[in-house]
Every structure is written in structure tokens, then in C-alpha cells.
Image: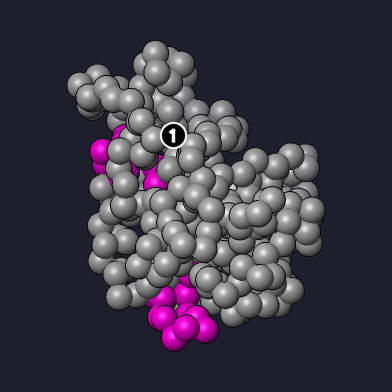
Amino acid sequence: MSLPDLRVSLVQGDTAWHDPAANRARYGAAMAPLAGHTDLVVLPETFTSGFSNEALASAETMDGPTVAWLREQAAALGAVVTGSVQLRVGEGVYNRLIWATPDGALHHYDKRHLFRMAREHERYAAGKDPITVELKGWRVRPLVCYDLRFPVFIRNRFGAEAEGRFDYDLLLFVANWPAARRYAWSTLLRARAIENLSYVVGVNRAGTDGNGIAYSGDSAALDFLGMPLLELDEKPQVATTVLSGAKLAEHRERFPAQLDADRFTLLD
């Protein structure tokens, strides 16, 4: 039995630098027309501040205004809303992806792979384990930006290791991926879809940040063959696509590469 179709909305915005209130208003206005027309709304990485080491001092907590806002948006839209934010937990600040559901529930994933070329690993605390969340029967694996470069961590398992199913049906990335490396972004998104027999959605920001770094957008939704269902250009925009559960099931049955996959254990 195949999964039902899943409507996914990509919200590619020009994030205001270090201005959470302005970003909540900006992204809230962009999402508002989606009410009742989507199942999942995806915002970029660090959508309240931009990718900034200097934003640590003003990092919110799980009881702060942005997490409350995500809950409100999910309820208003009747859809899951997800994106990452700098959040302080104890003595550390995490680049934390929040998964907010319409019924008020929250799940989170803390970015494991911290981008050392921007010294993120010196200032942020690292997460450890991935999460899998369910939506309309779909298993979804949400990850953050630099995670995209690490295929072992991302590997989609099948069978006894994944309780008789695949670990996930949709692989999701939120990002602030600079325009200078846009070819790597688009190439790796396709590779992750093909090798994991999974849909992949990547949502990047647009515009130029407060450090003068340009972003080309290039958000995309890809099928299990790495073929684009939706590709965005460099402008801020919102677009929705439909993922077919039936086509995914047909592909996995027709091309069961997972049966020949190498087994491994991630030690760290």
C-alpha cells in the first residue's frame, strides 16, 4: 500500500540580518496564503537572524517568541512548519531545527555537522542523532545545511534496522548555502535523492547577508531519481509541489537497490 500524496511548500526568503521580529513578520506574511493548501511548510536555516556567529548573544530559548510563533503558524496554516533557529539550551547554543505540528506538538533536531570554515564548530554546540518524524504516514528526515555533505550520516536504511521500512521517504534540508558553492548544493541534493531512493527537498535563503555573503536561492524539490519537481531561482518566493507516494513505492519496487546496500554502524 502506497503513501498518500504530500503537499510541500518551499519558502525561500531574504532573511533580515539579526532581526527576529522582522523575520517572523516577513515569513509569516509569505506563508499566510498557504493556509489549507499544504501539508508541510519549509523555511530556511536560521530564518530569524541569518547565519551569524554574532547572533549567539541574543539566542532565544525553547520558551521564547520564535518557538511560540512556529506553533501559532502551524495551527493557523493547518500544516507542519519547520526551519532552524539559534536556541540556547543550558550553557550551549544549538542550530536547532524545529518541527511544529498543527496540534501544538514540537520535535527538534540539533545540527550535527557544524561548518568549521565559518568557525561554527567553535561557537555552537553540536547535535548527535538524527530524528525521523511522521506526516500523513510519510517518514521525514530533517537535516541542516552542511549535513548535506555527509552521506554516511544520511544513509537511508531498510529492513530490520528500519523496522521493516525505509528510515525515511522524504529527506529535508534547510540551509544558508552561499552562491559561491551553488553547484555543490544542487549536485549533492540530487546525489542524496538517488542513492537513498527518496524524495529530497532543500530550502535555501536568498539575498545577501550582513557579512556580505550572497545566496542564490536554488531551493528545489527532487524525486527519487534526482529529477526536479520544482526548482526556484534567486528571488524570494513561495512554491508548492506534490510528492506522489504511489510513484515512490513503484520506484522502490522496480529498482530495489536497498537490498544490496552495505550495513554499517555509526560509532560517534
Image coordinates for residue 48, horizontal then vertical, percent: 64, 69
Left or right: where does residue 108 sit relative to residue 159?
right
Q: Indicate whether 178 appears above or below 100.
A: below
Work out whether residue 138 or residue 65 is closer to the camera in this orientation and state it: 65
- Residue 166: name its quadrant: top left
Q: Label 1: how many residues lie within 10 Å, few (<14), some (14-19) or many (20+)?
A: many
Left or right: where does residue 249 sit relative to residue 21?
left
Residue placed under numbered mark 1 in the picture: 169
Q: Indicate whether 75 appears above or below 6.
A: below
Work out whether residue 45 or residue 247 is closer to the camera in this orientation and state it: 45
Membership of 55 in magenta stretch: no
- Residue 249: name its quadrant: top left
Residue at image coords 69%, 51%: 90
Membership of 209 in magenta stretch: yes
Work out whether residue 268 or residue 66 is closer to the camera in this orientation and state it: 268
Q: Which image quarter is the C terminus in?
A: top left
Image coordinates for residue 57, horizontal then vertical, percent: 66, 70
Residue at image coords 36%, 40%: 154
Which residue in the rendered view is the most extreme toward the left?
260
Residue at image coords 46%, 62%: 122
* Secondary structure under the numbered disc 1 in the rendered image: loop
Image coordinates for residue 101, horizontal then vertical, percent: 70, 43
Residue stretch rendered in magenta on the structure: 192-216
Q: Indicate whether 262 appears above or below 53.
A: above
Q: Mark 1 belongs to which amino acid?
A: Asp
Q: Is residue 191 visible?
A: yes
